[in-house]
Amino acid sequence: MPEKRNQTSKRKPSAKEIAEEQRTLNRLRFVIDFTASMLRSGQLSTLEKLQLTRATRAFVLRLFPGKEETYDLIYKPRFDRIINEELNQN
């Protein structure tokens, strides 16, 4: 007896779904850029910088549940580098 193939067809996302995804990506971009800017501002203590990066991670993971590994590969090194550059300058 032949195996049944998965009959689910891929449908095109609706304009509403595309717009929602774009809003989510814009929110992500804003939060990441804002965090990087705050880390570079010189206005935060090291503890505050670490707290900010933890809060940013939590926010991003609410937007994209289950993407911890992706966050840790892309954004964590960026934030760590900014924090380390600031520490090495002082």
Image (cartoon, helix red, strand yellow):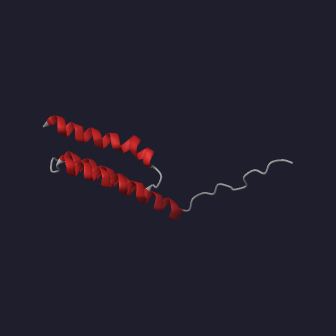
**Residue sitting at the far bottom:** 16
Residue 5 on image: x %, y %: 75, 50
Quadrant occupied by the C terminus: top left
Say whether residue 6 is left or right of residue 64: right
**Residue sitting at the far front:** 47
Res. 78 image quadrant? top left
Residue 12 on image: x %, y %: 60, 57
Say whether residue 71 is left or right of residue 18: left
Closer to us: 46 or 21: 46
Residue at 44% across, 45% down:
70
**Residue sitting at the far top:** 88
**Residue sitting at the far left:** 90
Residue at 84% across, 47% down:
2
Residue 63 on image: x %, y %: 42, 58
Res. 73 image quadrant? top left
Residue at 52% across, 62% down:
17
Relative to 30, is 73 above or below? above
Q: How many marks?
A: 0
Residue at 34% across, 43% down:
76
Residue 66 on image: x %, y %: 48, 52
